[in-house]
Amino acid sequence: MLAHGNRVAATALLVLLCGFALVQCAEASKPYKMNHPRPPLLANADENGEPLPVQTAKKDSRLDPANFVVVLIAAVILIYAAHRALRPPYVDVGAMTPSQAAEYNEALDAGEMQLHTTLLFVVVASCALVLIFYFMSAMSILITILFSLIATLALGALVYPYVDEWTDHRFSNEIDVPLLGPMPTLVFVLAPFCAIVVFGWLVTKSWLLNNILAISLIIFFLTSIRLSSLLVASSLLILAFFYDIFWVFLSSAFFGKNVMVTVATGLDVPIKILVPLFLSSGDDGATQFTLIGLGDIVLPGLLLCYALRFDDAKGADVFRNYFACTMAGYCVGLTICEIVVGSFHLAQPAMIYLVPGTLIPFFALAYFRGELQEAWDGLKSDTHTAIPDA
């Protein structure tokens, strides 16, 4: 089932990856908190029954504890996602049959990002960005539909292993689905419930439902895609770094106006996590929010997942390893970004802080341990599960 499921996820992940890049840049183009998106989120309704936008932090708002809650939430999500990517819940790899192990390995191979994929990411995301810029109305509807479908899939994938265990695998029997192959019955049991959550978000634009879907998307991505080496990780993050800078600061020189501003104001998908401010409220007493885009979590998160895999292969100590070191750098970088954004409302892409904040600690530790070449080339031996003898 893993192999068939991975084919379904492949197309979804390509769209999702581009979406993360688009929103990542869109976050950096909006006023006040440049690394936070300003989507037209809907919450309440006016006297005509039309939804009202959720208020985000004003330019004159001060640094709020919510800015640090954002860092905590991002760190907790990354810790969980990295460990889940390393060892899926309730999956005993050592107890797999030869066919199950082969299927598991096939799924891992299909989800591994190679060096050329990082360049493809930038090219495809840039083309999609320009396409949205010129055909905003039609593309906005299409992207909303696509992300709704992907969010349904991501939410189902998040809860599947826990529901499967809770129901004592009563729905594990498979049904043959055309084009997709055998699919567990539990997939069809969960699908309506996940669809209801997504539909609820589409109708209400509740920030709580938004966060549920956003977290599901993060975990879905980080557990479905993995980096093959530090070389690939560096390529991805450095390309994303300059990609941000170009589309945020230089696009107006080529397209007549800032492409990011146009896209950011017209695109509304659940690619952000909302945190209510503790110390500020709107003019009418409405709750204000600070935000973090999923691109600020997912892209560095891919390196963190690789760091944990590397630690696992080396048998590193829990607190003196690549994952802990890189996670500390991520938290420091994001904290600095939140302080600058929350205090001074200065415009900058978050990747300016997060790329050096994650890559430098990893490179430094690998250099001092004499493992830089090994990390750079990648751990080919840990990519596959040994297939037991029949």
Image (cartoon, rainbow, N blue to C red):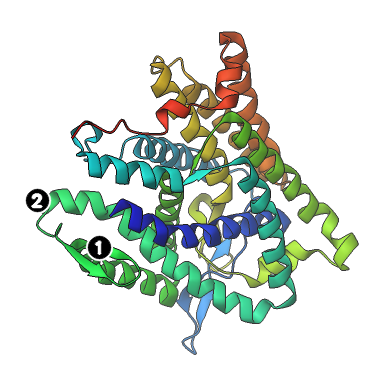
Q: Secondary structure at mark 1?
A: strand
- Position of 348 with respect to 5 (left or right) is right
Label 2 secondary element: loop
Which of 63 and 346 lies nearest the eye of the viewer?
346
Q: Residue at x 70, y 78 (%)?
A: 135
The residue located at (53%, 69%) in the rendering is 41
The answer to whether one can see residue 32 in this image is no
Disc on res. 168:
2
**In the rendered structure, which amino acid carries the disc numbered 1?**
Met
Q: Position of residue 86 (x, y in %)?
A: 37, 35
Q: Which mark is residue 160?
A: none
- Give the class, few, some or many, for how many residues have Cα within 10 Å of label 1's Cα (few <14, many ≥20): some
Residue 40 point in image, percent of width and height: 58, 70
> From what the image shows, is residue 133 above or below residue 347?
below
Q: To which residue does mark 1 refer?
A: 183
Based on the displayed image, in which of its 4 quarters is residue 184 positioned? bottom left
76 left or right, relative to 286:
left
